[in-house]
Amino acid sequence: MQQYYVITSIDISMKKLIILTGLALATTVAMAQSADSYIVKTKGVKKTEANVVKKKTNGEEEPTGTDFVSQNFRYYSLCDWKDGMKFMVLPEKYDLVVNTFRDAGTGKEIPSGKLRRKIMIYNNHSVGQNGRSRMNFTCQDDNKKYYFELPNGEFEDYCYGKTGVPTLAYLGDVDIAREKLMNQTLVTRTTDYRVDVDYDSDSYNDVKVEKNMEVKVVAVGVGTRSFPVKIIVADKKGNEFYQNVAISKTNSGMRDDEFIVDNEKFTFYGSFDLMSGETKVSTDYAQYMGKTIYTKYATSMTTKGGGKDNRVVKVPKLMAFRIDGMTPVRNTNYVTLTLSETETGRVYSKDVTFVNESVVGDIDGQKEDYFGYLFGFGEGKLRNTNAATRTMIREGRVGMGMTEEEVEMAVGEPDSKADINDGRYEWTYKRTKSWLIIQFSKSGKVVGIRTPRRTTATKAKK
């Protein structure tokens, strides 16, 4: 016996309700995962994150340029914002006092803390009933409508400035950086980075790392409104650290001239460079790798050692180093040397040029940075001296028993030389307020050191 079922309008309505509820639930879950996937942390505080495949908006104008940033990351002024652009609400301290958004339905202000880490989709601009311009958004997480009311003027008057919409970090840069940089090898360009403290807050600890070190990108997520792209890297030992950087600077709220000095590291090239093409050691420099060199003159280098932070120190002449790394400096004729001292293993870095000194001359002090002028190959003559004498030479002092060669290494060539008696002789050096007079024995060893003041009588005698 056949059975028939009568499908009523109530049945259809119930089925629609169930389907719509299921779709809404699935959409809510997907949105929550999408927002959560932008939160990345250094090793130790990360939690499982959903992998989100990002696609470029159809018809979006491609950036143009000759380097990685200009080729891939376009700056959008507010005037250029397009429907569908995505941002994340990341309030800072001031934003928790002055609210940014209003509920489009009620017009009431919404606490910024309530919208923290919510994704906002841009929906163009309009003019409200009060005559004030506003920028409209849909919250991806709850599908509610919000708007940011411009503080003054019409939209066209406001949109060309660098102020932007407070609290919003541009996620378009994060999506592109994730696509282009994940698993790439980069080179560190500063010594100052961060590690996360926990997952739920934005707390971090500062860390110091070696400059010009190869690192691998292990995660890319959202940083802050001013520096929206958080790049987490790991060194060869697996240590993770990160930097928040502004790449296109869209809605960063900062002018270009503010990305200098302490803020320079919050640009991509201030903290990283791609380990490809010009950043690799070319065949022109390969011949120097692993070589032992020594300083022919005192010079400044950057070092890290002894438990102290990286700092610029004065390195004396005749110190021996091994060349452990060579990295060209972008858009210059300089190369950053990574050097380890042969005696202690302490690591230094020094920017030098390999452009011939006859071409460079002494323009802007570049002669002192010319590799051939500053360094000699090998460990130098200093290695033939004892430890105490090496210390004195490096400090520019002369001691009893030194040879002519050691005196020259310590204080250079004399202003004058003179024989005295019994085969002894003297070297005289002119100082600001005195003379340095060194007496040598017949065998060529220092037997006397005098430093008379440069009086009129002394000058006449000389």
Image (cartoon, grey):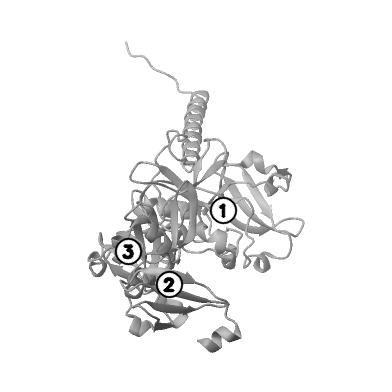
Q: Nearer the viewer, residue 257 or 343?
A: 343
Q: Is residue 273 left or right of residue 113?
A: left
Q: Looking at the image, is mark 3 or mark 1 nearer the viewer?
A: 3
- The extreme front residue here reads 422
Q: Which residue corresponds to mark 3?
A: 382
Residue 329 image point, x, y percent: 38, 67
Q: Secondary structure at mark 1?
A: strand
Q: Secondary structure at mark 3?
A: helix
Residue 348 image point, x, y percent: 40, 58
Q: Which is more N-terminal, label 1 or label 2? A: 1
Q: Which is more N-terminal, label 3 or label 2? A: 3
For residue 122, which numbered disc appears in the image? 1
404 above or below 362? above
Separation (CA) of disc 2 from disc 3:
14 Å
Q: Residue at x 43, y 37 (%)?
A: 43
- Amino acid carrying label 2: it is Val
Mark 1 surroundings: few (<14), some (14-19) or many (≥20) residues within 10 A:
many
Q: Secondary structure at mark 2?
A: helix
Q: Is residue 401 left or right of residue 432?
A: left
For residue 411, which numbered disc appears in the image? 2
Residues at marks 2 and 1 touching, judged by CB atoms closer than 8 Å:
no
- Amino acid carrying label 1: it is Tyr
Separation (CA) of disc 3 from disc 1:
68 Å
For residue 318, which numbered disc appears in the image? none
Mark 2 surroundings: few (<14), some (14-19) or many (≥20) residues within 10 A:
some
- The extreme right residue here reads 130
Q: Which is more N-terminal, label 1 or label 3? A: 1
> Is any atom of residue 255 visible in this view?
yes
Q: Residue at x 45, y 35 (%)?
A: 46
- Amino acid carrying label 3: it is Leu
Q: Residue at x 63, y 66 (%)?
A: 161
